[in-house]
Amino acid sequence: MLWDLYCRVIDNHGDVGVCWRLAAELAARGHTVRLWIDDATALAWMAPRGAPGVSVHDWPRDRVEVEPGDVVIEAFGCELPPAVVRRMAAARPAPVWINLEYLSAEAYVERSHRLPSPQPGGQRKWFYYPGFTAQTGGLIRERDLAARQQAFDAQGWLAGWGLQRRDGEQIVSLFCYEQPALDALLDELARRPTLLLATFGPAARQVRALLGPSLARGALRAAPLPALSQLDYDHLLWAGDLNFVRGEDSFVRAQWAGRPFVWQIYPQHDAAHQAKLDAFLDRVLAQATPALAGALRGAWRAWNDPALAWPGLPERAPWQALAEAWRSELAGQGDLVTQLAAFVAESR
C-alpha cells in the first residue's frame, strides 16, 4: 500500500526519529511511504543513506495537488493541513486516517487504543497507541533486529570510531537533556574503570564542561561522539554495559538492546511526565526484587527531578537480568508495524 506519514518536528528530533524508523520499516516490508515533514535537516545525519521505498517531501502548504495514499498517518497529533483533509474527503475509497500517539505505559492507553473519532465530511480518524502490552499497538521492531544484534561485533564497531575497551573497563553511553545530576554520576562512574561515550549535543557539551580538557576523572575517561545515524546509535547501545537515554526513540531502542538503562523523560511544564515515568516503572519493575525495584526507582526519579539527590546506581547483575527478561516479554508481543498493517487491512 501507499502510506502518507505526516510529521512536525517540535524539538530535539524525537518526532522525526520515530517517524523515520516507522517509514523505513514499512518500506522494508514492501509498502511505499511518503514522509511529509516540516524540517528534514536531521535526516542528513540520522538516515544519510535514506531507505528504499521512502521518499521525503516538504510539509504541504495551501494547495495540495497530490492524491492521498491508502493510509494517512498523522504522527503525534500534528494536525494535517486543511487542503490535505479536503483531498482525503474527496478520495474514493477514502484513506485510512490514523493518529499515531506518543508512547506511554499509563492505563488510559489500553482504553483509548483503536478508538474512532468522527471528523467533518463524514471521515473517521483512528487513535492508535504504541505500548508495552498485548492490548496496545506494540513497539517498532525490525524483523531482523535480533539477528543483527546477535551478529554485532562491539569491538570492531568501537575500533571504527578509534576507540577500544581497556581491560576491566565498563562502557557507558550518555544521551541526555540538560542534566543537573550528571556531576554526581560522573563521580560515581569515576570509582571504577569506565569509558563514557557522550553523544553529540547536550551530553557531550555537559561532559566537556564538567571534565575539562582532560576528559577524565579518577578511573573515568570520556569520548565525545559525532552525530550518529540511527543504525550507529543502535550499535552504541549494543556496545554499552549501561545506557542513559532520553525521549521516546532512544528509550525504545534501549529496551531492545537488553542492557541496563536509565531514562530521562521529556520534561513537561505541568509535571505530567512524572506520572508517565512512574507508570513505566510500575510495569517494568513488577517482577523485580524489592531491593532492585527500590534502587531503580530512586535512580530514575533523581535523574528526572533536580530537587532529588543522586542516590547511586543499582547492583549490575540483577539489573542486567531484569533488562533481558523485559526484552523477552516485549518480544513476545506483536510489533507496531505488523499490528498497524493488520489494523489498516481490517479498517479498509
Image: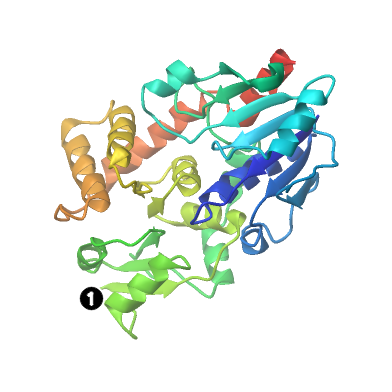
User: Could you classify mark 1 by the number of other residues whose Cα lies within 10 Å: few (under 14), some (14-19), or many (20 or more)?
Assistant: some
Residue visible at 38% across and 58% down in the picture: 176
Give the camera-side residue of 150 and 27.
Answer: 27
Q: Nearer the viewer, residue 332 or 344?
A: 344
User: What residue appears at the point 79 percent right and 27 percent down from the top-left corner?
Assistant: 70
Q: Position of residue 188 (x, y in %)?
A: 20, 63
Q: Is residue 80 left or right of residue 65?
A: left
Looking at the rendered structure, the kind of residue marked 1 is Gly
> Quick check: 337 above or below 303?
above
Q: Position of residue 206 (x, y in %)?
A: 34, 71
Q: Residue 151: give x, y in percent of width and height.
A: 60, 48
Q: Position of residue 96 (x, y in %)?
A: 71, 23
Rendered position, 40 above or below 100:
below
Quadrant (top left, top right, bottom left, bottom right) of the N terminus = top right
In this rendered view, identify the residue nearer to me: 69 or 195: 69
Q: Quadrant of residue 68?
A: top right
Q: How many marks?
A: 1
Q: Write the residue at 20% across / 64% down.
A: 184
Task: Specify the farthest residue to the bottom.
Answer: 213
Q: Is residue 138 left or right of residue 204?
A: right
The residue indicated by pointer 1 is 218
